[in-house]
Amino acid sequence: MTPSSPPTAPIVRPLARLLLAALLGGCASAATRRTPADDAADRAALLRLHAEQRTAHLERRAALIVGSQADTMLSVSNGRVSTATRERTRASFQSYFDASTFQAWDDVAPPRIRISPDGRMAYVIVEKRVHVTSASPTGGAPVVERLRYAWLSVYEKQGGEWRMTAIASTERPDST
């Protein structure tokens, strides 16, 4: 090698190794890349879970609600963060359902779904109109409520199934 010739061998070998690593890394990530079919299947599964929640409310079936929950779930509501087991959530919902009749539990808008690029997490944003009649806690006349709910449910894919791991919920009176 003369002083004016480029030093090819010392530079080419590390560059070739770097390019090979980049190519292999690109192939590995392509193998885990999601397809439109993956996205459609996950979206359909999340919409099915959303529909099951409606059925659970109208048919007073708390077990159906918690069937898609993780073993423990975080809840953000009324200025608090709480954690509940699946069984505690089921018992609480069943007690509520036993004292309630739903006249409406309807989407105001289609659920907004976002699935992570790796397909392991998702969220569903819901706006719901709920009209419910509940037994009075004091034994008086039934309580009629017309509410508008909005919530964000967070899901993780566990064992190939979507499991709700967290929910943040708000409510306000419904004018319709």
Image (spheres, helix red, strand yellow):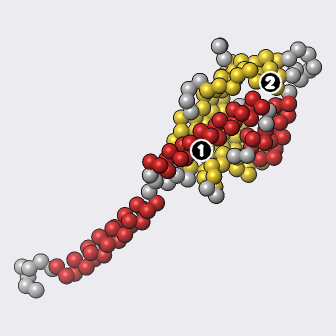
Distance between the Cα atoms at labels 2 and 1?
A: 27 Å
Q: Can residue 173 be seen in this view?
A: yes
What type is the residue that disc 1 sits on? Ala
For label 1, the crowd category at 10 Å Cα-Cα, with few meaning under 14, some 14 to 19 and many 20 or more, is some
| 17 lies left or right of 112 | left
Location of the C terminus (image quadrant) = top right
| Whole-percent x, y for residue 46 in the image | 59, 42
Extreme residue in the right direction: 139
| Whole-percent x, y for residue 23 in the image | 33, 68
Residue at 22% across, 77% down: 12
Location of the N terminus (image quadrant) = bottom left
What type is the residue that disc 2 sits on? Thr
Q: In which quarter of the image is residue 175?
A: top right
Residue at 53% across, 39% down: 113
Q: Nearer the viewer, residue 156 or 81?
A: 156
Q: Earlier in the sequence, mark 2 or mark 1?
A: 1
Q: Is residue 50 above or below residue 148?
A: below
Q: Mark 1 sits on what residue? A: 45
Q: Can residue 77 be seen in this view?
A: no
| 14 lies left or right of 74 | left
Q: Mark 2 sits on what residue? A: 101
| Whole-percent x, y for residue 139 in the image | 93, 19
Q: Is mark 1 on a helix, strand or loop?
A: helix
Residue at 80% across, 20% down: 133
| Whole-percent x, y for residue 93 in the image | 80, 36
> For residue 84, which numbered disc appears in the image?
none
